[in-house]
Amino acid sequence: MTKIVTDVVCPFCGTLCDDLEVKVSDDGTQILEVYNACVIGTEKFLHSQAKDRLKVPQMQDEEGNWKDVSIDDAVDYTAQMLCNAKKPLMYGWSSTNCEAQSTGNEIAEIVGAVVDNTATVCHGTTLIAVQDVGVPSCTLGEVKNRADRIVFWGCNPAHAHPRHMSRYSIFPRGFFTGKGHKARKMVVVDPRSTDTAKMADVHMQIEQGRDYELLSALRVAVRGAPLPETVAGIPRETIQDVAETLKSGRFVVIFFGMGVTQTLSKNHNIDMAISLTRDLNEYTKAAIMPMRGHYNVTGSGQVLGWQFGFPFCVDLSRGFARYNPGDSSSNDLLRRGEVDAVFVLGSDPGAHFPISSVKKIAQLPSVCVDPHHTPTSAVCKLHMPVAFVGVEEAGCAYRMDNVPIETRKVVEAPEGMVSDEEFLKMVLTRVKEIKGVA
Ligand code: SF4
């Protein structure tokens, strides 16, 4: 008899959908079907069932040949590497649970590492802006139940967060939004004609990299002050119409993505977007929210915040926490040659970092902890395969609106495989032995 596991949380994107149902075999070892998830979420569950999945750690020698090693050897190599380095980089942390993140941070403190997460190349600028000007935000539940004016700025949820619009922002009928999408107005700001933009009531096809100007122009239009004929390629009348549309709503939410966090002006764009949100609160209720990508990048910022006071780029190499994005961020450290070992967990910098940084990782003692073969594991000296968090291991994750959600274990991991947290606890014990720490 097969069984259905209900209320499963999808460990893929920051939407962290918690209504999945998964059909598993009667012995609880195989996933047979996944219901309610989008295509990316479904793949995450089914991928764990791959027949050719790597199950034992592998080390790469000087000639690039891989050989199997035991978990004890993998633990010892990782602990020795971290203890022998003057300034190791411990990067990633966005596709794992808060329990593993916390254990990793404890290791980092003992060995004097720099801890950084994927925000360093996505919403780190958002975190800086929030520190600058604060943030009027809300939960996705409030969006579903109250929001009738939705702005997507520099993001494409139709592809990157496929159930965001159906669960929270556009289509659902909530307590005060009983007509669903019919009563919502959708504005998209994007230089590209994306699938999200094609669904919008208004698509402002902004000129690339001119977000700061258009955000400023909207602030001007909200106050009814004069504007030039066009701003960032958008006609004055369109800007004024959008400003009126937002002001006339009962609840405005601005969602924004890397199209605005990583373009010209970076954190200053977000300062301006937050200021626009604050201005709109003079006329109606308004909130703003980043579209966080990895399912627990938000949790990594939270855990680092509890433990060291800063959400990313935390440099512990002097025995206390320092935070200086642009200096203590992973790519800056790698390209300046300031780190002498690299530990990666819950991310794939081999696929996302500039090639100059990836080449540096390939030259250093390095460990990649990941269930998959990835471009990062291909350049690291040790690849430690682990159980899939959220599929074969439970634990806490934070949704993009900072709501913590307990993910569920759906099936058992293959025999002998450990989770991220278990591996890190073994490394922590070994690090303490080497360092003589109680
Ligand atoms: S929208 Fe994101 S969290 Fe929801 S099922 Fe798809 S990948 Fe998973």
Image (tube, grey):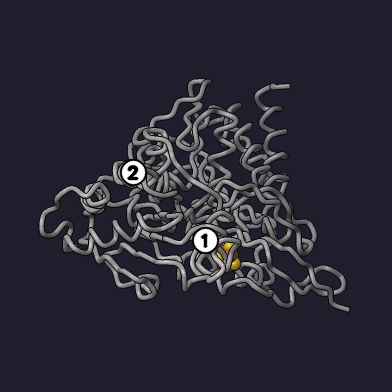
Q: Dot 1: what SS? A: loop
Q: Position of residue 187 (x, y in %)?
A: 35, 64
Q: Nearer the viewer, residue 78 or 421?
A: 421
Residue 126's quadrant in the figure? top left
Front label number (1 vs 2): 2
Residue at the spot x=66%, y=31% of the render? 431
Q: Which mark is residue 166?
A: none
Q: Nearer the viewer, residue 224 or 353?
A: 224
Residue at the spot x=61%, y=35% of the render? 80
Using the rendered image of the protein, determine whether residue 361 is visible from the camera's viewpoint: yes
| Left or right of residue 400, residue 212 in this image | left
Q: Give the class, few, some or many, for how many residues have Cα within 10 Å of label 2's Cα (few <14, many ≥20).
A: some
Identified by mark 2, the residue type is Asp
Q: Nearer the viewer, residue 266 or 132?
A: 132
Q: Is residue 323 above or below residue 254?
A: above
Identified by mark 1, the residue type is Thr
Q: How many marks?
A: 2
Q: Which mark is residue 374?
A: 1
Residue at the spot x=52%, y=61% of the render? 374
Q: Quadrant of the C terminus?
A: top right
Whichever of labels 1 and 2 marks the residue nearer the N terminus, that label is 2
Q: Which mark is residue 279?
A: 2
Q: Is residue 152 above or below residue 362?
A: below
Q: Position of residue 4 (x, y in %)?
A: 80, 72
Mark 1 beta carbon near ligand 1 (under 8 Å) = no
Q: Dot 2: what SS? A: helix
Q: Position of residue 122 (x, y in %)?
A: 41, 50
Q: Give the class, few, some or many, for how many residues have Cα within 10 Å of label 1's Cα (few <14, many ≥20).
A: some
Using the rendered image of the protein, determine whether residue 13 is visible from the camera's viewpoint: no
The quarter of the rendering in which ligand 1 is drawn is: bottom right
